[in-house]
Image (cartoon, rainbow, N blue to C red):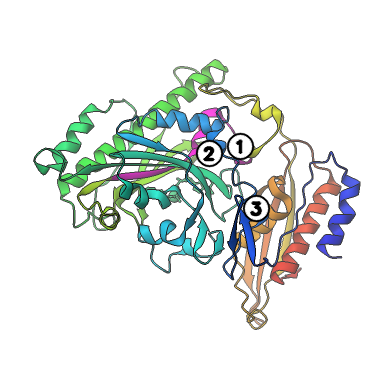
Amino acid sequence: MSTTTLLRALRPSTGSTSILRIRQIPRYYSSKITVGGKEYPTDEYTNLPPHIEACVGRNLHLSPNHPISITRRLIERRFPAPVYKAHNTLSPIVSVQQNFDSLGFPLDHPGRSRTDTYYINEKTVMRTHTSAHQADTFAAGESEGFTIAADVYRRDAIDRSHYPVFHQMEGARMWSRSEVPNGDIAAAVRADLEKLPKHDLVVEDSGPIFHEGNPLQKAHSAEECEAIAAHLKRSLEGVVVEVFGQAKKAAIAAGEAKEDDAPLRVRWIEAYFPFTTPSWELEVLWQGEWLELLGCGVVQQSIPDNAGTPDKVGWAFGVGLERVAMLLFGIPDIRLFWSKDERFLTQFAEGRITKFQSFSKYPPCYKDVAFWLPSSSSSAGGQVAFHENDMMETVRGVAGDLAEDVRLTDEFTHPKSGKKSMCFRINYRSLEKTLTNEETNALHEAVRTALKEKYAVELR
Ligand code: FA5
Ligand code: MG
């Protein structure tokens, strides 16, 4: 049975009130694709599916009573005007130049691949991060610092803290060699550091500011780098203090925490980004695991140089707004942010931090799918190798938010035939109701069919 027939067979029985959403994944694109109301030519790069395009324009970060917007405003408060200008309405459709080239991504960087990024066509992508706007914002030179909050798009894992569309806030603060007193950047940055509010949060931070593996840039003196790093870290620790102070107040009000509960654990770890060095990530301990909140670092000098502002030096960060909002509101699953369920939406109001009241947890249902990948000879006709993210997208495409997580549970290559086998476990769970066995089976069958049709896998 083809997917279409199967879907037609399913729809009448599930009725119009059913929340079961099984979708068709397009295998081919016509010559034009409409994204955010505008038409773009397609080519062999095009891989943006309709269920992702449908998120363009939802603007959760601009809906005043939505937790993503409440979180955005809370963080923006730490980066006030006139030093920081907030940009919150930049289009998610950007050029490959903006998203990758302007930031120094090497041509073979995995982030550029079609398995990781949604391409509208060869030259145009859905931004994968708010850093895509860094160079343009430096070039415009409207303010010393800025924040940019926006929706970003990535082909990524499926689990409770990853979603293919999420929100980031970029922040940057630059100082101009030609404008600071005596051209002394280090002194000017240190003076601004003194003006930042102090806090008593203990943040684990070991190791030197820079070293061979996380190097100082040639264009910066050690003193400059140290001052910029200190200003960056203090600014972001301030965000954490604010956010978690508010979260704790809300938890105490809800009777879920006490004033003298164990303090929050936060740590800096070294990181790598093509567009900053040295670089770090900030993590917090959440439900027993370290959760990465943001990436940051000293801006690669080539970016302001190429943007026509070579006398500027400074820092940048990018924080995941969902990650912060989950902690702030106690929201246990990233899919909830996209919920249109009144039981979710009516819980939140602008400027208020309250603990999310779960509307009961419906049972999960696990299903496994195993298959052989087409052997390389049969995939010669331009077909690319199967990537884990292809699985993620197939499941999202068919089951939408009814898929809670997808995990690769087994992978092996047959010693004689050389064929590769993969097994995935899909956890289906609705946030809104109990899925019946029949519904889960139908979803799973549609996933299997889609895999077979789109990737020519041999189901086992
Ligand atoms: C970046 O996107 C960099 N642009 C951040 C940056 C900006 C570094 C400026 C240096 C200077 P990364 O891929 O780690 O980095 O994503 C940043 C944050 O976005 C993560 O820390 C996490 O909080 C969030 N994030 C990443 N992937 C997802 C996802 N699939 N779902 C939800 N949140 C995500
Ligand atoms: Mg990261």
Q: Which residue is mark 3?
A: 406
Residue drawn at 56 percent across, 21 percent down: 256
Mark 2 close to ligand 1, CB under 8 Å: yes
Does 81 sit above or below residue 106?
A: above
How far across and how far down the image is residue 95, in percent? 46, 59
Q: Quadrant of the C terminus?
A: bottom right
Q: Say few, some or many: other residues with alpha carbon within 10 Å of mark 2 (under 14 / 14 to 19 / 20 or more).
A: many
Q: Which residue is mark 2?
A: 322
Residue drawn at 65 percent across, 53 percent down: 406
Q: Which residues are magenta?
A: 315-335
Q: Inspect the image, locate mark 3, and give the three-letter code of the amino acid beneath it.
A: Val
Q: Inspect the image, locate mark 2, and give the three-letter code of the amino acid beneath it.
A: Glu
How far across and how far down the image is residue 265, in percent? 41, 33
- CB contact under 8 Å: marks 2 and 1: yes
Does 378 sit above or below residue 173?
A: below
Cα separation between marks 2 and 3 = 19 Å
Q: Which residue is mark 1?
A: 337
> In which quarter of the view is residue 362 placed?
top right
How far across and how far down the image is residue 356, in percent? 61, 26
Does 55 sit above or below residue 411?
A: above
